[in-house]
Amino acid sequence: MAKTLFSIIITSYNQRNSIRNAVDSALAQGYAGREVIVVDDGSTDGSPAILAGYGDAIQLVKHARNQGVCEARNAGAFQAVGEYLVFLDGDDILKPWALTVYGRIVEAFRPKLILSSLSLFQGPAPVLDPDTPPEIEIVRYDNLAEKDRSCRMSGSALVIEYQTFHKVDGWTRHFGLMEDYDLTVKLAYSGRAIQILAPSLVLYRIHMTNMGHNIHGLIPGCLKLAAADRSRNYYFARSRRLVPCPLIGGPALMVVRRAWRAGLYAEGLKLCCARMIMSPSVPDRNVP
C-alpha cells in the first residue's frame, strides 16, 4: 500500500453547483499516495446528499452547523494522515496533474510550504488536458518572508507540511477575510518555501462572493495582520517584524486601492497609518 504523501482537504458550504467539480478533480489525481477529505460545513442546499454519494471514495466530515471556513479546514487537517496538506475550496478545481507536480517538488526539496499558481475561470468548468506538463518553473526561498514574486493568494493555492501546519495551530479561528494571508504570514519563517510560477495547478472560480469583492471585510482583515505583526503573535516570527514584507505590504496596498476606489478614504488612510505599506527591499532570486 502506497504511503500517504498528500491529504487533499476540500471544504464546502452551500456549494451544490460546484462541489462535484472540486471532489472529482481530487479523485482524478493520478497519484497513488493521496487521500481525499471533504468537510461539509453545515450546508443546507442539498450538497450533503451529493457528498454522501461518493461513499468510501472520500472521508466525509460533517458539521451540524456552519462554523466558518477556517474551522472547516482545521477539522479536515485533524483527520489527515498525509505528510502534506493540500487545501482546496469547494468552488475551485485541481488540474489533473497537480499532485504529480507537487510530488516532484516534495521529492526534490522537502519544503515546509508550497505556494501554487492559479488560473481564473467563470461559468462551467473547462475541459482539461490530463497530460502532465513537461516543465516546472519555480522560485526557491529559504523562508517565505523572502518572497519577491507576485501571486494570487487563495486557500486553494497552499500546500503545507503536516507538522509545520500544526506548529502554528493551523488556520486562525474566526479570522474573517484574508485568512489565507494570515496563514502565510504565520508560516513566513517556517523554513524552505517553493513558489510555483508555472504551470498553473488550480482553477480558481470567479463569482460575486469571492473575497476581493467584499471591501468591508478586507479592511479589518488587513488591520488584524498589522496588529498581529506588531505584537509578535506569529509563531515563527516572534523575534522579528515582517514589515517591510511583501506578504503584508502587497495585500495591504491592494486593499487600500480598492478602499479608495469605493470612496472609503478614511479606512484607506487608517491602513496606511498602520505602517503596513512599505517598499520591500528583497533581492532578486534566480528561477532554476
Image: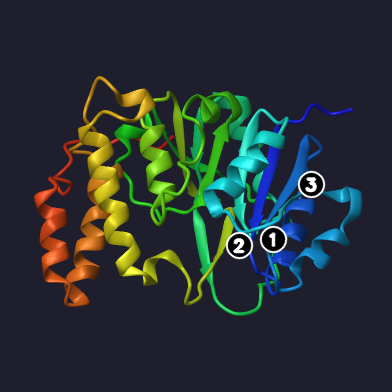
Q: Secondary structure at mark 3?
A: loop
Can you tell which mark lies on residue 92? 2
Q: Are marks 1 and 3 in contact (CB under 8 Å)?
A: no
At horizontal 44% and vertical 25% (from top left) the residue drawn is: 192
Disc 1 marks a residue whose amino acid type is Ala
Residue 269 lies, with reference to residue 87, above or below; the image says below
Please tell me whether residue 60 is drawn above or below residue 17 in the rendered image: above
Number of residues whose C-alpha sits closer than 10 Å to that of mark 3, classed few (under 14), some (14–19) or many (20 or more): some
Q: Is residue 94 visible?
A: no
Mark identifier at residue 275 = none
Task: Please tell me which residue is depicted at 24% across the width and 54% down the height of the picture.
Answer: 252
Q: Position of residue 265 (x, y in %)?
A: 12, 70
Which disc is residue 30 wearing? 3
- The amino acid type of the residue labelled 2 equals Asp
Q: Name the residue tied to disc 1.
A: 22
Q: Quadrant of residue 269?
A: bottom left
> Distance of mark 2 from mark 3, alpha carbons?
18 Å
Quadrant of the image for the N terminus?
A: top right
Using the rendered image of the protein, determine whether residue 18 is visible from the camera's viewpoint: yes
The mark nearer the N terminus, 2 or 3, is 3
Q: Disc 1 to disc 3, how far (Cα)?
A: 15 Å
Q: Secondary structure at mark 1?
A: helix
Between the residue at mark 1 and the residue at mark 2, the CA separation in whole angstroms equals: 6 Å
First in sequence: mark 1 vs mark 2: 1
In the picture as drawn, the residue positioned furthest to the bottom comes out as 123
**Helix, strand or loop for disc 2:** loop
Please state the horizontal and vertical placement of residue 61, each as a whole percent of the image: 75, 48
* Residue situated in front as seen by the camera: 272 or 119: 272
| x then y, percent, for residue 193 | 45, 31
Instruction: Please name the residue shown 73% across and 30% down the image.
Output: 81
Q: N-terminal of the two: label 1 or label 3?
A: 1
Identity of the residue furthest to the top in this view: 239
